[in-house]
């Protein structure tokens, strides 16, 4: 069974540009989460989808970040326009039900220059 | 504010020795705790979890201890191997599984 996959693995963009990260959760997992780790700090929650609905987006830093999960399958996280402080590793995780084990993708390393 | 944190940023141990990684949490309402292992270039990998109605749980070579009195969580790795070298994160879960709150991470280095 395929795990959580994220694309791209690395992205280097200039300040002001747009980047879209993608996450394919494990098939059948209704719960999808986005996290990020910036500047060697702890991993921080961004938002949580249950199917196509946003359950909690309290961790989204500002309105330059837009997450979608149309159809309740894969999810995208768009940063527009990107700023230097957005650099970090963005992780996606999924799980079948809340309280069950969460499986993480390998992450997307975003570098804004 | 509420947080989950780690006491030591780096832990170096000899191969074959036991390792203990510690974590403190501040939210007494948390009822689920997880340890993750992250190797270079990979995402966090589940190691072991424990719920607040338990104080100890054992897996294969790993044991998690939970002390709710002092809000302390630890991960014990028996007979540490080079493959155990990684960054270890503790995490707590609240709000019935809405999200995980992670600590800052401890890097475990195993010396041959």
Image: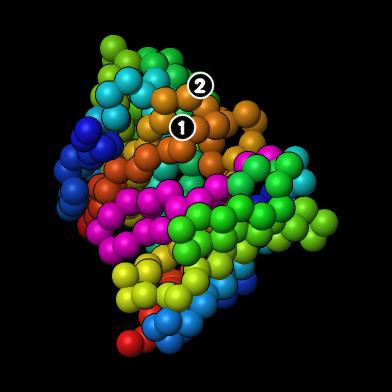
Vertical side of B83 occupied by A79: above or below: above
| Closest to the observer, B99 or B17 | B17
Tell me the quarter of the picture where residue A77 sits: top left
Q: Which mark is residue A47?
A: 1
Count of number-bearing discs: 2
Q: In the drawing, does residue A8 fall left or right of residue B14?
A: left
Callout 2: 10 Å neighbours few (<14), some, many (20+)? some
Residue A23 in the image: state x and y as whole percent. 26, 33
C-alpha separation, residue under disc 2 versus residue under disc 1: 8 Å
Indicate the position of residue A28 as horizontal and vertical percent values.
32, 20
Residue at the far top in the pictured view: A71
A73 horizontally vs B26: left or right = left
Residue name at image x 27 percent, y 37 percent: A4
Q: How was the colour assigned to the protein in this rendering?
A: rainbow
Q: What secondary structure is found at the residue carrying circle 2?
A: strand
**Observer-nearest of A75 and A113:** A75
Q: Which residue is mark 2?
A: A55
Asked if residue B10 can be seen in this view, the reply is no
**Chain ID for label 2?**
A
Q: Nearer the viewer, residue B28 or A42?
A: B28
Is residue B27 among what the camera can see? yes
Q: Main secondary structure of the magenta part?
A: strand
Labelled pair 2, 1 in contact (Cβ < 8 Å): yes
- Indicate yes or no whether the magenta region holds residue B39: yes
Q: Nearer the viewer, residue A84 or A107?
A: A107
10 Å crowding of disc 1: few (<14), some (14-19), many (20+): many
Q: Quadrant of the C terminus of chain B?
A: bottom left
Same-subunit check for callouts 2 and 1: yes
Residues rendered magenta in the picture: B30-49
Which chain contains the residue that carries disc 1? A
């Amino acid at each position: 069974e395929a795990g959580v996959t994220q694309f791209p693995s690395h992205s280097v963009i200039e300040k002001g540009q747009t980047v879209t990260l993608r996450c394919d959760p494990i098939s059948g997992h209704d719960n999808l989460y986005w996290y990020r780790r910036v500047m060697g700090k702890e991993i921080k929650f961004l938002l949580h989808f249950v199917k196509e609905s946003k359950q909690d987006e309290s961790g989204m830093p500002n309105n330059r970040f837009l997450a979608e999960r149309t159809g309740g399958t894969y999810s995208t996280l768009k940063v527009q326009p990107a700023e230097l402080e957005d650099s970090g590793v963005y992780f996606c995780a999924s799980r079948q039900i809340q309280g069950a084990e969460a499986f993480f993708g390998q992450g997307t390393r975003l570098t804004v220059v | 504010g509420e947080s989950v944190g780690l006491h030591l940023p780096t832990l170096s141990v000899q191969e074959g020795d036991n390792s203990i990684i510690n974590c403190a949490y501040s939210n007494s309402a948390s009822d689920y705790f997880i340890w993750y292992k992250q190797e270079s270039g990979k995402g966090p990998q589940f190691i072991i979890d424990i719920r607040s109605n338990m104080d100890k749980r054992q897996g294969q070579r790993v044991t998690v201890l939970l002390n709710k009195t002092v809000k302390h969580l630890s991960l014990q790795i028996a007979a540490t191997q080079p493959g155990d070298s990684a960054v270890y994160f503790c995490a707590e879960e609240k709000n019935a599984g809405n999200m995980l709150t992670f600590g800052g991470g401890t890097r475990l280095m195993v010396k041959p």
